[in-house]
Every structure is written in structure tokens, then in C-alpha cells.
Image (cartoon, helix red, strand yellow):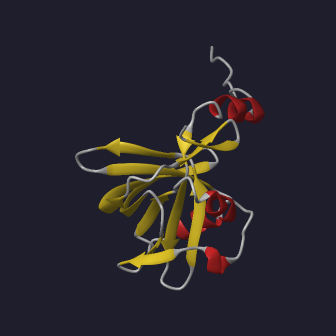
Amino acid sequence: MTSPVSEGIPPYEFRQTLGRFASGVTVVTATDGEERRGMTASAFVSVSLTPPLILVSVDHRAGMHALLSREDVTRFGVSILSSTQRHLSDHFSGKPGPEEAVPWFLHEGLPLIGGSVAQLVCRKQEATPAGDHTLYLGLVEYARYTDDDPLLYFRGQYHELG
């Protein structure tokens, strides 16, 4: 006899519960050579030191998903936002401000966010479907960082280190 498959907890309860996990705020960026796109993501994690791997989770409905799922898009960037870049998190999460206010800069043709705490350039290694998201595993090929304070997200609100 097979037991029924559980659908898990309701989405609202899941979001509220995981909102208790404080995280940094990143902007994932990519380009196909013509279109430049960024997306705010707190679902970002380091995976391995050797080799240097990270993972980002991208909703299937996001424009970034359509771009990253393309075969010809082989790299993506991750910029870890500083405490002074709350407006950029809003900009790339569906509340866009003026595009000219985004401090874009290019590293070997890949757009990154200037003034952020850290920037990573990643080679797309794997794309794994996971529910309503896809998990993109990236091999870090370039990194730079500062000692500035990061922007934090906790219980649905932005915070800064104390």
C-alpha cells in the first residue's frame, strides 16, 4: 500500500518561517550580449571551496530564468549588496527606479553592480529543476570584495549590522 504524497506546508507559512533566517542580499546578473538583466536574490549559498562553487535559486516566472536557461548564456554574476544599496535591491525585485541610477560595470563583458560588498563571476555548471525554481550551480572564475557592511534581509525587512 502506498502512502499519500504530502504537499508540505502552505506557501505563506513556509515563507514566514524561512523569513526568520537572516541573509545577505544579492543581485544576480547576466547578459546575452544584447540584453542586460539583474534580479534580487537572497537564495544564494556557497557550495564548495574546492572547486569554488555557488548556487542561486531562480523562480521560473522571473525574466532572469528565461535568460539563464539559454544555452548561449554560459556565465552569470552575483553582486553582494552593501548596506547603502537598499534601493538597488528594490530596483531588481520588481520596484524599478531609474535605470541610470544603477552603477553597472562590466567584467569581461558581464554586467556587475558597482559599489557592492563583493562581486563574483561564475561559469554556469548545472541547472537543476526544483519545484517552481531552478537551481543554478556556478563555478566562481573571478571574485573581488571590500570590507564594507552588507545589506541584510530578515523577517521581510532590510537591516544593517549593528
State whether residue 9 is above or below residue 93: above
Q: Position of residue 42 (x, y in %)?
A: 56, 47
Q: Is residue 55 left or right of residue 90?
A: left
Res 85 visible? yes
Residue at the farthest top position: 1
Locate residue 159: give its quadrant: top right
Q: Is residue 152 left or right of residue 156?
A: left
Q: Residue at x 58, y 58 (%)?
A: 84
Instruction: Assign the N terminus to one quadrant of the image.
Output: top right
Q: Position of residue 88 (x, y in %)?
A: 62, 63
Q: Residue at x 63, y 32 (%)?
A: 18
State whether residue 87 is above or below residue 107: above
Q: Which of these two is toward me, 139 or 99?
A: 99
Instruction: Assign the C terminus to one quadrant of the image.
Output: top right
Q: Which of these two is toward me, 32 or 151?
A: 151
Q: Is residue 109 left or right of residue 64?
A: left
Q: Residue at x 44, y 49 (%)?
A: 55
Locate residue 118: give its quadrant: bottom left
Residue at the farthest left position: 50
Locate residue 85: give its quadrant: bottom right
Residue at the farthest bottom position: 34
State whether residue 162 is above or below residue 78: above
Q: Residue at x 48, y 49 (%)?
A: 149
Residue at the farthest front position: 162
Q: Which of these two is toward me, 143 or 130?
A: 143
Q: Position of residue 69 (x, y in %)?
A: 52, 65
Res 69 visible? no
Q: Position of residue 23 (x, y in %)?
A: 54, 41
